[in-house]
Image (tube, rainbow, N blue to C red):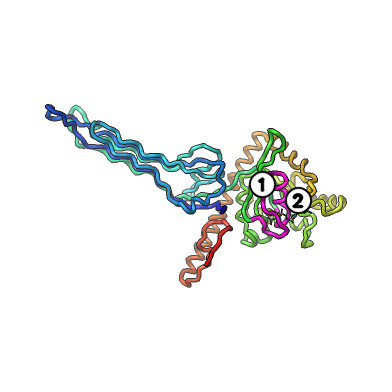
Amino acid sequence: MRFVDEASIRVDAGKGGNGCLSFRREKYIELGGPDGGDGGDGGSVYFRGDEALNTLVDFRFQPQYRAGTGESGKGKDRTGSKGEDLIVRVPLGTSVYDEETDALIAEVTEADEDILIARGGFHGLGNVRYKSSTNRAPRKTSNGTPGESFNLRLELRLIADVGLLGLPNAGKSTLISVVSEAKPKIADYPFTTLVPNLGVVRIDYNRSFVIADVPGLIEGASEGAGLGIQFLKHLSRTRVLLHLVDVAPADGSDPLENFKTIEREVAQYSPAIAQKPRWLVLSKSDLVSGDVLAELQARLLSESSLVEKCYAISAVTQTGLQPLLHGLGDHFASLDEARKEAQENLDKAAGQDAHNYSKMLRDARLRRRQGQDDEEDLEPDDFDDGSDVVVHYEP
Ligand SMILES: Nc1nc2c(ncn2[C@@H]2O[C@H](COP(=O)(O)OP(=O)(O)OP(=O)(O)O)[C@@H](O)[C@H]2O)c(=O)[nH]1
Ligand SMILES: [Mg+2]
């Protein structure tokens, strides 16, 4: 399945039905009174969070959403029927922006909750409504009002408790594959993971949390190197970031430098995400001796003030996993209201950072496209205004 996390759509709520102009026609009654009924209200467009969805790909193929028009009123004082509401299912974690004003209209974070996005028009009044003692035969009616219409920008930022951060090959996907039922692709080459994966970790029968594996970052990711940095948006709704550091990188690089590189890129992308609680996870501990591990841990901790906790794990030999998982479970169980609120504020700021970054990329692409229009030398990538990477451009 293609993973798409941004899309532009158009929503139109239904127009209200017009009021009816009608007079009673009855046998033997010469002048019947007015009996034109009201129109029906226009249908509204609602968004409903759906847990089963995790991509906005459908919105790329179907970018128009229209609710039903209210029916006009009818004679014999009959009201027109209401236009049908349209319920659009979106993945949890979808933020909805007005494309014109760039205002955040809604955030869909709860399943099966309907959020009003575009209100249907109000019904018009039939002439029966205008009857008065001075006007027994009004010819006046009113028309239904138009429904609201918006061009919307949808941005999906996945919801997870834990986000994984690290260089390619750090062992992120291997970790998620051994602690959850998620089965991401794992390989000894960088950029194995091309799209974010979610896995549910069950600690015991009543405690579980969701962990998000995102593609690895490299130096310069914030300038577009590697897969770029836009997947970091999927860490904006997480509560703890596990920064995985390979203790024995195959390329002989220094784990401490690697750690700093990633932290720099994250801060570049979003100061708010960089402020999220950070736990250091030394990964592939089976590859070094206990002494080397202890020394490395001491070095990393002395150089990084933002690390709250540190664990050493090996996903391959399944060492050190239980302390890490229980540490996370205990952390979530112990969050008090003040920390939860602080976290919500941080999530909002992180979402805004991610939104601004996406907008900047889009604007830059647009400028490039406009510049190249004259030269008629377009890159295939210029036609894609989202951040999905699983795009194949066949000649
Ligand atoms: N020895 C050892 N190797 C590991 C361990 N965890 C992962 N690996 C290996 O490291 C390589 C990379 O693992 P992945 O889980 O694909 O790494 P990743 O961080 O998801 O990489 P990207 O998706 O490219 O960002 C694979 O060859 C794994 O088998 C571990 O605990 N010990
Ligand atoms: Mg991976």
Q: Position of residue 245 (x, y in %)?
A: 75, 53
Q: Which SS type dominates the magenta stretch?
A: loop
Above or below, 189 against 174 in this view is: below
Query: Does the beta carbon at disc 2 come under 8 Å from ligand 1?
Result: no
For disc 1, the marked residue is 182
Q: Over which residues does the magenta segment extend?
A: 166-193
Given residues 70 and 52, the one toward you in this image is 52
What x and y, as percent, mark residue 78? 27, 32
Which of the two discs, 2 and 1, labels the residue nearer the N terminus?
1
Q: Residue at x 55, y 38 (%)?
A: 110
Q: Alpha carbon of mark 2 to alpha carbon of mark 1: how far?
A: 31 Å
Inspect the magenta stretch and tell me whether residue 2 lies in it.
Answer: no
What amino acid type is highlighted by mark number 1?
A: Ala
> Is label 1's Cβ within 8 Å of ligand 2?
no
Task: Please give the residue where the numbered disc 2 appears in the rendered image.
Answer: 304
The residue type indicated by label 2 comes to Ser
Residue 290: x and y, percent?
86, 50
Quarter of the displayed picture in which ligand 1 can be seen: bottom right
Q: Residue at x 51, y 65 (%)?
A: 368
